[in-house]
Image: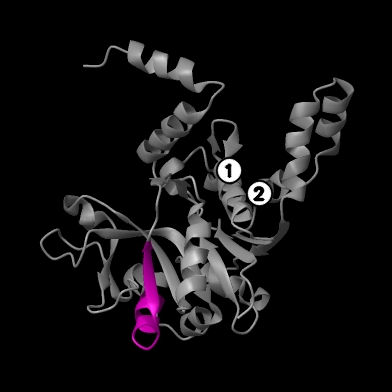
Amino acid sequence: MPKITKAIITAAGYGTRFLPATKVQPKEMLPIIDKPIIQYLAEEAVASGIKDIIIVTRAGLHSLEDHFDSAFEIEHRLEASGKKDILEKLKQLTRMANFVYIRQTKDLPYGNGSPLLAAQHLIAKNEAFVYMFGDDLVKSKVPATKQLIQTFNKTRPQAVIGVQEIPREETNRYGIVKYKKGTKINQIVKLVEKPAASEAPSNMAVFGRYILTDKIIKILENLPLGKDNELWLADALNKLAQTERVVATPINGKWLTTGDPLRYMKAMVEFALDRKDIGPEFKEYLKSLKLN
């Protein structure tokens, strides 16, 4: 199997929880301080050895494509005004990877499995690739994607799923993995969607980082629609796990979802506190707030 060099990032949703902010821009372009969410994902992928980034979008999301493209007028003005540090940051965006944009057309069903069908012609036979959800960020010393690739290279399964431990009382909010007994590589039997704490097979929650192969695409092509009449990746992974090895890897780092306004703001605070230029002053500001 060739080296993993491709990543598919989902950005075809409607961001309904963030309306009206997402009426004319994709949720993945909402900023975490001075960089959009999707740039953090792209940087994580590149830091993990990815060369080709495939972004699956829907109609009207031109800002995603423009963000990673050259901006002649802005670059010219920055150069003329001597702001070379900012200019270099913009130029790095176009050089960081080979970006490909695919539209998820109306003939595909809604669901987090459909972007894989939209991009399937870019995946070769027996090729492994990274799959990233556009609203999950991870703070870690070793990029989360790199951790998954390391597990894949070591164990050679047909899929690697990023997971993180959560309080058991929160299992009803996430997909939870059920491990296969007697294995030393965290092989799973299936994913259980939002089980009650008393029924959860573990407290390891799945989030938007995967290593997949073309086998998952073949399953999705023939998979019936699931809950809410959507095409779910979890259903395809459960089918794959019946005949192939699917491994769950606990990620060493902090998972931060931006899927709703509250958790988006929490992620903003986390990243702001990490910034050397604004973190110390922001921390003092937070301490000064008189909260009841």
- Residue 220 placed where, x, y %? 47, 80
Q: Give the total number of marks visible in the rendering.
A: 2
Q: In this figure, which residue is indicated by the disc labeled 2?
A: 64
Q: Identify which residue is drawn at 54% across, 30% down.
A: 33
Name which residue type carries label 1: Met
**Magenta-highlighted residues:** 235-249
Asked whether residue 109 appears in the rendered view, the answer is no
Which residue is more in the foreground, 33 or 2? Answer: 2
Does the CB distance between marks 1 and 2 fall below 8 Å? Answer: yes
Q: Is 241 within the magenta? A: yes
Asked which quadrant contains residue 117, the reply is bottom right
Q: In this figure, which residue is indicated by the disc labeled 1?
A: 29
Q: Residues within 10 Å of mark 1 (few under 14, many from 20)?
A: some
Coloring applied to the structure = one colour
Residue 86 lies left or right of residue 21; in this view the side is: right
| Residue located farthest toward the left when viewing the structure as drawn | 198
User: Is residue 200 depicted above or below 94 in this figure?
Assistant: below
